[in-house]
Amino acid sequence: MKLYQLLFIRLIFILLAIVCSFIIYEKQLTYTSLLFLVAFFVLLIELFSFIRSSFLFYDKTISAILNNDFSADFSKHKTVQNYNSLFTLYNTLKDKQNEHTSKDLVYRAILNNIETGVLILQKKNTDWDIFLMNDYFSEHFDIPKVSKWKYLKNQLPVLCSIIEDRNFEDIRTSVQIRVDKQDDQTFMLQTSKTKTYNEDYYIILLDSIQKVVAKKEKEAWINLMKVISHELMNSVTPIRSLAQNLEDIVGQESLSKDDMEDIKQSVSAMIHRSDHLQSFIDSYRKLAMLPSPNKESIELSTLLKNVLQIMNPLFVNAGVTVNNTINNNRWLTVDVLQMEQVLINLLTNSIYALENKTEKHIEITSEIKSNRVFYRG
């Protein structure tokens, strides 16, 4: 039954009560008239309570929706048809909330199972709250899942200083962070800022350089295996086809002149493909066999000076300035040519990394720890 019908019935009863009260009063039935008058007031109070209850029900339902509280049970009110639209809205929003919650759980499960440190910040007024910190980030850096940026600064001051110095802008660089009082570890830092529904978010990703290198090596090996497999199949498939053809020919009772010619051509083709396959395998075998180091003594400063002299034309063309602060006379026992190639590769990568930068500058330093020399650039 609709709400206005219930209201109309109540008004009818109230009107009947007041009319009957007046009619009976005119017939000098005073007590009966008073009884109907009391019934009138009771019905009036019940009407007020009904209207108040209806408004309170709407208010309670809307308040629950606004507070994302979908735990209420309104089954006892389903007989009132006026509430159907409200129930439809409530159940639709409840389903969407459940769907959103399920997706949120799935996304968090995915982020918690990847081996990359993920930190998502959400801006609140002028401060940043930690919207999400995945398990890898918390466990790798041995920090609790704090809720405020200012608490994280006490745990990872180096990382937070870099981000604050860049004013929470997009960053792509390498950083060195000390983990659990061990030696500094190098990480690839990537950050990005995004805005959705008038909310500012700042996403921070930290990848261990060792894992990035391992991933690249794995991809390189996969590509190498694809090339080798493709080349092997291109050689083995025709050889097998020719061998099968020879098998069919020699299986005949007699061989004609044409058969002998086919045999010669097939054997010649098989030898040619075998030679190609042998050459291909030899080339990759040589590639995999790195030469043994020819070690000799050289000063650290001299080694770097030679490399910078070689790289100087590239620095000039790229507009890169280099400041070499290494001036110690420490002697190293290394393969000079191999070590020069390593340094050339590192400096070349640095030039590529500075392509889109306005200030192109490379600072080269070194330090000695545990009888080891560490370069930094």
Image (spheres, helix red, strand yellow):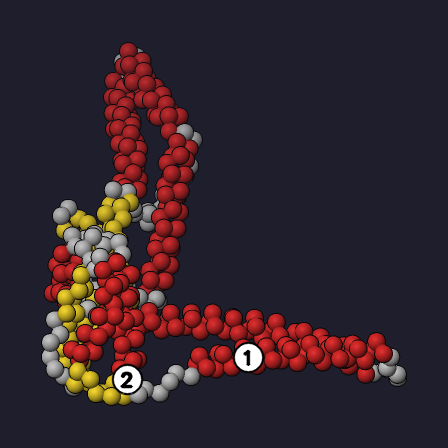
Check disc 2 and report the residue beneath it.
335
Q: Is residue 335 visible?
A: yes
164, above or below 366, in the image = above
Residue at horizontal 35%, vertical 26%? 7
The crowding category of the residue bearing disc 1, from other C-alpha atoms within 10 Å (few below 14, some 14 to 19, many at least 20), is: few
* Numbered tag placed on residue 314 in the rendering: none
* Amino acid at pointer 2: Asp
Residue at the image point whose x is 39% and y is 83% from the top: 290
For the point 17% across and 82% down, the residue is 299
- Amino acid at the residue labelled 1: Ser
How far across and how far down the image is residue 248, in percent? 80, 79
In front here: 348 or 257?
Answer: 257
Residue occupying the point 35% across, 48% down = 97
The quarter in which the N terminus is drawn is: top left
Left or right of 45, for residue 100: right
Q: Which residue is mark 1?
A: 279
